[in-house]
């Protein structure tokens, strides 16, 4: 029977149901409930199978979206999982944390008038269902090459690189200073967006494929980079970006002012029962909290504060809601969970008491001026509008800058003026750095970005490394 292409008119877009807000506010578990097979098939069937699929173009890894949607409508889950893995090393993570409302779903032909196909949720359905039914990657055709590569950093970039190397017969050995793989997937993104059992399951799959993990290993401290560079045929650096951006205002270092990642990492480590080399647990129970910033990290901080039992949580941002960098979906979730949003406020100073303890934030009101070169309207200060908003704790969530270690620079790896590693996304030797046997990718090359762009870089770097380790000439001159 031929496909009813007008299915999208009869079947409306439905999003996965969320757990009740009162339960969400105390739980560190994912808020979205799974959709049934029938619901997922019905939603997948809304796809028009566009000749030129905008969703696929907008996706940074160019997932074969219409094709796997069709396999779902046919109930072919293992085939759909195989296809998902052809372009993406961590589809179950992307299904959960990609900002689809800014990527594939925003580009879907049906988006404006009928509601985009629920692409992200179906990606999650495919992978979760396939795993439940025992799907595993088939590596029976892979011929071992005898080459081995060290991957430093077990975040999405490092994991994606190790995945593609392994599928091409190269032994990947991954080093990370944390006790679990995942990088920010595990320690930055809170469990209410991505439960840590999902990362653990992926680790089991990767270990089953032959990827070796050396965790709790801080390269440059526990093991020297030089020894890795000499021992392996190539090295992939995927260290992320971990220097906190500051506001440059007074008293930012006062007691009671915290960096977003210290807060989030400490919270997740406590939930995971990690004590070795763990960050201190920062507890906002019973406190009035102000989070400064308007991105996804700020949303994770406000929602974590709510779950810890803060009495009042405010997100203060210097532009208006329309100009917030965070995903609208996460802003909506935060609002539902009781977070107050205060827009057009620029922090000037942390108000402190006589003991130097933070007691609030001094703000000035702003209004949006003319658009800058990127089309973004800059906030302009409204003179005389200063006031102090009281708080017991303040979290700074202004983003992150690269944190290139000295050992990397000593090895001859060049960085740009902002500290990002120089590695070009070229067709051959993709993401090779200024040092021949060293490749780099993810946030440390792009600057803080997204899980899916880090995956893309890791996969491309693996192809660059394959070019490199099998090219005798390059090995000779490197
Ligand atoms: P990372 O994930 O940072 O991984 C780097 C790894 O390198 C870490 O595990 C670190 O321990 C390890 N490492 C560093 N130095 C060493 C060393 N010397 N020795 C050994 N190991 C080392 N993106 C989304 O798409 N969706 C989201 O919802 C989202 N939410 C986010 C929430 C927060 C709070 C933050 C901070 C970011 C969020 N992002 C989100 C961005 C996304 O997490 C990152 O872009 C992505 O994780 C970058 O991947 P990466 O592999 O480059 O680096
Ligand atoms: Fe299907 Fe939307 Fe992609 Fe078109 S743009 S192929 S309708 S998911």
Image: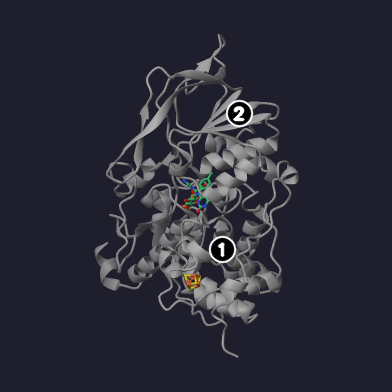
Residue 136, by quadrant, is bottom right
The residue sitting at the bottom extreme is: 1
Q: Which mark is residue 417?
A: none
Between 326 and 430, the one nearer to me in the picture: 326
In percent of width and height, residue 262 lies at 55, 35
Q: Give the answer, above or below, for where 237 lies relative to 396.
A: below
Crowd band around label 2 with a 10 angstrom C-alpha radius: few (<14), some (14–19), many (20+)? many
Residue at horizontal 73%, vertical 41%? 26
Q: Is residue 376 visible?
A: yes
Q: Give the answer, above or below, for where 375 lies relative to 140.
A: above
Q: In the visual, does 116 lie left or right of 367?
A: right
In percent of width and height, residue 384 lies at 40, 17
Q: Earlier in the sequence, mark 2 or mark 1?
A: 1
The span from disc 2 to disc 1 (Cα, nearest Å) is 32 Å
Crowd band around label 1 with a 10 angstrom C-alpha radius: few (<14), some (14–19), many (20+)? many
Task: Specify the quadrant that holds the N terminus.
Answer: bottom right
Q: Ligand 1 within 8 A of label 1's CB?
A: no
Q: Give the secondary structure at mark 2.
A: strand
Task: Specify the quadrant that holds the C terminus.
Answer: bottom left
Residue of label 2: 289
In percent of width and height, residue 252 lies at 47, 23
Q: Ligand 1 within 8 A of label 2's CB?
A: no
Q: In the visual, does 453 lie left or right of 476?
A: right
- Coloring basis for residues: one colour
How many marks on residues? 2
Q: Is residue 233 visible?
A: no
Residue at horizontal 41%, vertical 23%? 249
Between 126 and 330, the one nearer to me in the picture: 330
Residue at horizontal 69%, vertical 57%? 17
Q: Which mark is residue 120?
A: 1
Residue at horizontal 56%, vertical 75%? 69
Q: Give the secondary structure at mark 1.
A: helix
């Amino acid at each position: 029977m031929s496909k009813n292409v007008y299915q999208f008119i009869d079947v409306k877009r439905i999003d996965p149901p969320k757990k009740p807000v009162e339960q969400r506010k105390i739980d560190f578990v994912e808020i979205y409930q799974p959709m049934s097979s029938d619901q997922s098939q019905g939603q997948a069937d809304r796809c028009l199978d566009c000749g030129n699929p905008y969703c696929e173009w907008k996706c940074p890894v160019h997932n074969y979206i219409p094709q796997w949607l069709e396999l779902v409508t046919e109930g072919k889950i293992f085939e759909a999982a195989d296809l998902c893995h052809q372009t993406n090393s961590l589809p179950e993570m992307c299904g959960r944390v990609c900002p689809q409302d800014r990527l594939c779903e925003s580009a879907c032909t049906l988006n404006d008038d009928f509601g985009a196909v629920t692409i992200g949720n179906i990606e999650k359905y495919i992978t979760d269902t396939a795993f439940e039914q025992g799907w595993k990657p088939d590596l029976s055709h892979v011929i071992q090459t005898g080459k081995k590569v060290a991957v430093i950093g077990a975040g999405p970039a490092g994991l994606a690189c190790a995945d593609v190397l392994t599928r091409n017969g190269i032994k990947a050995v991954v080093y990370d200073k944390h006790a679990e793989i995942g990088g920010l997937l595990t320690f930055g993104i809170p469990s209410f967006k991505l439960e840590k059992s999902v990362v653990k399951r992926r680790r089991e799959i990767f270990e089953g494929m032959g990827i070796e993990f050396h965790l709790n290993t801080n390269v440059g401290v526990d093991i020297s980079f030089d020894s890795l560079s000499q021992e392996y045929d190539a090295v992939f650096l995927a260290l992320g970006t971990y220097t906190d951006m500051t506001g440059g205002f007074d008293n930012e270092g006062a007691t009671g002012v915290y960096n977003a990642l210290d807060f989030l990492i400490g919270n997740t480590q406590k939930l995971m029962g990690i004590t070795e080399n763990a960050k201190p647990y920062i507890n906002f129970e019973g406190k009035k909290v102000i989070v400064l910033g308007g991105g996804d990290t700020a949303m994770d901080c406000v929602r974590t504060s709510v779950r810890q039992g803060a009495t009042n949580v405010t997100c203060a941002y210097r532009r208006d809601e329309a100009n917030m960098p965070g995903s609208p979906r996460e802003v909506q979730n935060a609002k539902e969970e009781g977070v107050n949003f205060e827009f057009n406020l620029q922090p000037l100073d942390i108000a402190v008491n006589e003991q130097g303890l933070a007691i609030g934030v001094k703000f000035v009101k702003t209004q949006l001026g003319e658009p800058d070169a990127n089309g973004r309207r800059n906030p302009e200060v409204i003179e005389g509008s200063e006031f102090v908003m009281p708080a017991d704790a303040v979290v700074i969530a202004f983003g992150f800058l690269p944190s290139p270690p000295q050992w990397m620079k000593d090895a001859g790896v060049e960085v740009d003026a902002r500290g990002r590693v120089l590695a070009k996304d070229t067709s051959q030797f993709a993401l090779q750095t200024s040092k021949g046997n060293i490749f780099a990718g993810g946030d440390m090359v792009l600057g803080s970005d997204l899980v899916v762009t880090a995956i893309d870089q890791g996969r491309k770097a693996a192809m660059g490394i394959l070019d490199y380790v099998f090219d005798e000439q390059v090995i000779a001159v490197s």
